[in-house]
Image: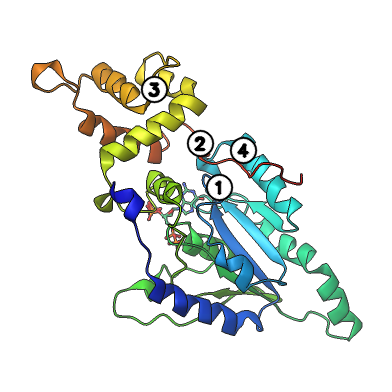
């Protein structure tokens, strides 16, 4: 299947790694924006190693689309690793107001030591990282009141690093370069594709929808039953559920067969559009120190 052979672009990542390393000395903390629906798959694990030793703030973004109970568990998990955590819906602005106080709490020892040296009101600088489509630009715009969209992403325009002021004593470093997720584990690619972070042109839609249905049927059967007016039985796999849903919707082709491709597109659209509800697609690792 195509999903298993998705590859990323090591050249881009090398450039981004260099940039992160070069700028690390200029910042007090690192803010990593994650998709609350897939907090692990939307991370680049290299960030841990690259930014080791820097205080870390995790922004669980897109909480409006994620399962609230699971978001609590993920927040507890990241806190157990020593990170500060905030939960945001950058699109509507929910939770973004907590950002500056979360940074100041995270850096309280550093602020105290600056103040002990007489450096009152010294500017705190935070590097913001996130894989494409996680909501990084939306988040930065909301937190800072920045108006401009992603002008720097226009083709042919070289992105340069940008310091974005939040207030008098807090600045963000909007990092140029693309931070790729890690596709080595095929399930990561699949989850990114569920959320639409990977374009549908590069994946097999039916395979993807079947896997999504499988996950939802096992973990959120009520949502599927309500939306598609069907009954989920234990033996139903993703394909069987796609067929049931397609039949209910009347998506039939000659011979009375279900048009599963059409149903696949509908499922993915409805899932991404929030019509089925709020879902989290992965669990925090076992044995988390909560
Ligand atoms: P990026 O810089 O990380 O690549 O992502 P960007 O901010 O461009 O956001 C990608 C899409 O995700 C945008 O939608 C944005 O509105 C949406 N988004 C960002 N944060 C959230 C969130 O917390 N919740 C929800 N539901 N959506 C979020 P778009 O379709 O590209 O544009 P538009 O429809 O918002 O105009």
Circle 4 residue:
70
In the image, 1 versus 170, the foreground residue is: 1
Of labels 4 and 1, earlier in sequence is: 1
Q: Residue 279 bears which disc, if any?
A: 2
Residue visible at 53% across and 54% down? Answer: 90
Q: Secondary structure at mark 4?
A: helix
- Residue 163 pos. (x, y %): 56, 79
- Ligand 1 is in which quadrant of the figure? bottom left
Cβ atoms at labels 2 and 3 below 8 Å apart: no
Q: Secondary structure at mark 3?
A: helix
Instruction: Determine whether, in the image, residue 31 is placed left or right of residue 254.
Output: right
Instruction: Determine whether, in the image, residue 209 is placed left or right of residue 112.
Output: left
Q: Residues within 10 Å of mark 4 (few under 14, many from 20)?
A: some
Residue visible at 87% across and 79% down? Answer: 113
Cβ atoms at labels 2 and 1 below 8 Å apart: no
Q: CA distance from mark 1 to mark 3?
A: 23 Å
Of labels 4 and 2, earlier in sequence is: 4
Classify the position of the C terminus by image quarter. top right
Q: Residue 36 bears which disc, if any?
A: 1
Of labels 4 and 3, earlier in sequence is: 4
Of labels 2 and 1, earlier in sequence is: 1
Circle 3 residue:
227
Q: Secondary structure at mark 2?
A: loop
Q: Residues within 10 Å of mark 2 (few under 14, many from 20)?
A: many
Cβ atoms at labels 1 and 3 below 8 Å apart: no
Q: CA distance from mark 4 to mark 1?
A: 9 Å
């Amino acid at each position: 299947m195509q999903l298993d052979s998705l590859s990323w672009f090591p050249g881009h990542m090398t450039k981004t790694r260099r940039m992160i390393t070069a700028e690390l000395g200029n910042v007090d903390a690192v803010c990593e924006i994650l998709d609350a629906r897939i907090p692990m798959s939307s991370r680049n694990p290299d960030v841990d190693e690259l930014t080791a030793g820097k205080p870390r703030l995790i922004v669980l973004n897109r909480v409006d689309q994620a399962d609230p109970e699971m978001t609590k568990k993920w927040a507890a998990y990241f806190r157990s690793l020593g990170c500060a955590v905030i939960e945001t819906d950058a699109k509507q602005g929910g939770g973004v107001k907590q950002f500056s106080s979360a940074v100041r709490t995270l850096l309280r020892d550093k602020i105290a030591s600056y103040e002990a040296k007489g450096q009152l009101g010294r500017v705190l600088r935070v590097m913001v990282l996130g894989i494409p489509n996680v909501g990084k630009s939306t988040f930065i715009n909301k937190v800072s009141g920045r108006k401009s969209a992603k002008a720097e992403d226009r083709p042919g325009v070289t992105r340069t690093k940008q310091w974005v002021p939040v207030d008098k004593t807090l600045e963000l470093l909007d990092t140029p370069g693309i931070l790729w997720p890690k596709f080595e584990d095929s399930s990561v690619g699949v989850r990114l594709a569920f959320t639409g972070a990977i374009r549908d042109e590069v994946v097999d839609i039916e395979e993807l929808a079947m896997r999504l249905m499988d996950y939802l049927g096992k973990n959120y059967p009520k949502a599927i039953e309500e939306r598609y007016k069907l009954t989920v039985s234990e033996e139903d796999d993703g394909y069987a559920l796609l067929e049931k849903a397609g039949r209910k919707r009347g998506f039939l082709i000659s011979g009375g067969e279900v048009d599963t491709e059409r149903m696949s597109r509908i499922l993915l659209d409805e899932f991404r559009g929030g019509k089925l509800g709020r879902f989290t697609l992965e669990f925090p690792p076992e044995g988390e120190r909560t």
